[in-house]
Image: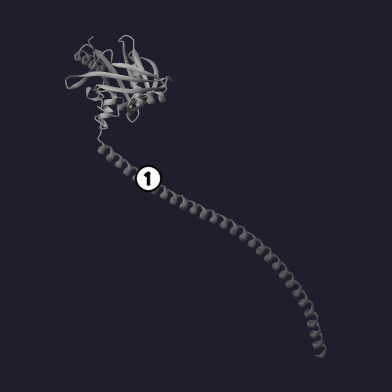
Amino acid sequence: MDGEVECEIRWKIKNFGTFQETLQKTGWKLKGPYSAVDYFYQPKCGNFWNPKKKRIKIREWKTPKSDACIYLMQNDVVLWKGNDYQKTIPPFSKIKLFEGSIGKCKVALQGMGFEEWILIDIADGRLWHHPKKKMYLALEKVYRMGWTGRMNFVGKTSKIVDDKMRRTISEFKVPRRHVKLKTLIVMLAEKGGRMERPSDEAIKGVQEIRSLKESKEEAKSEKLVAAFKKRVKKAEKIKKRSLKKKVTKKKVKVKKKVKVTKKRVSKKIVKKKAVKRKTTKKKAKVVVKKPKKVMTKSKKKKRK
């Protein structure tokens, strides 16, 4: 039974809202949201599996909630115009090995001699369908990548698949240079330099580098915390000083007002008393002088 050629493309979406609006206007319909986590595994011993040809993973469904599944995928790689296309190998292109809880799936793979390799977190996914063209489009928000578009094209030859892909990209107005003809696991493995099994020396070196980085980060965090504590203490001291100044100013103002009122009252009383004494003295002098002047004049006349 001959297989078919398949290609998976992915591109980044800058304006997610406007892109969804254009999909609605051009006849695309939203089937439903989803979110999932893919755990890819590699055998502990033996040959390292090339993710372009062979991979095994656990798909944990977050929304809609359902049991986790173990999938085994195998395919051949076909080169055409410098790009890799997948040729499916029926009926082994995608097999569901087990279905159950995420814990049971992990125990099953560990028992078969596999260890966890790369994790892909699809935080938000939205599947769109075009009923006339009979095409599907997945918009996925991948952790540390943002919103991306994903589409799969199937045909008898790589040329047919490539023509389909180019037509759809032109409809979406996505430049060909922004489109990657690779699966997400291959992209992440190539980016992280994990397309081959690392040696024991490389693993030790990575562990040492990680420990050094962690120690440096801890030292930096400690310094930042110490500086922050100093700032807090300074701010508290400044607040206390300002509160003390406010309290002292209020007390001084009250004392000054009381003193001024007392002085004013005492001055008024003293002035009134002094005026009364002066008037009494003047009257007494006038009464005494008048009889003396009269007696002197009469005596002089008589003598003459």
Q: Residue at x 29, y 23 (%)?
A: 55
Q: Is residue 107 left or right of residue 9?
A: right
* Residue at the extreme left: 81
Position of residue 226 measured from the top left corner of the image (x, y, whole percent): 42, 50
Towards the viewer: 244 or 296: 244
Against 227, residue 140 (above or below) is: above
* Residue at the extreme right: 302
Q: Is residue 123 left or right of residue 52?
A: right
Q: Total marks drawn?
A: 1
Write down the quadrant of residue 71 in the picture: top left
Q: Quadrant of the C terminus?
A: bottom right
Q: Is residue 247 left or right of residue 182?
A: right
Towards the viewer: 118 or 157: 118
Label 1 neighbourhood size at 10 Å, few (<14), some (14-19), many (20+)? few
Position of residue 88 measured from the top left corner of the image (x, y, whole percent): 25, 15
Towards the viewer: 22 or 272: 22
Against 133, residue 172 (above or below) is: below
Write down the quadrant of residue 288 in the picture: bottom right
Can residue 160 be seen by looking at this rendering?
Answer: yes
Q: Residue at x 26, y 37 (%)?
A: 200
**Image colouring:** one colour
Position of residue 208 measured from the top left corner of the image (x, y, whole percent): 30, 42
Against 170, residue 43 (above or below) is: below
- The residue beneath circle 1 is 218
Q: Quadrant of the N terminus?
A: top left
Position of residue 195 measured from the top left corner of the image (x, y, whole percent): 24, 29
* Residue at the extreme bottom: 303
What amino acid does circle 1 point to?
A: Glu
Q: Secondary structure at mark 1?
A: helix
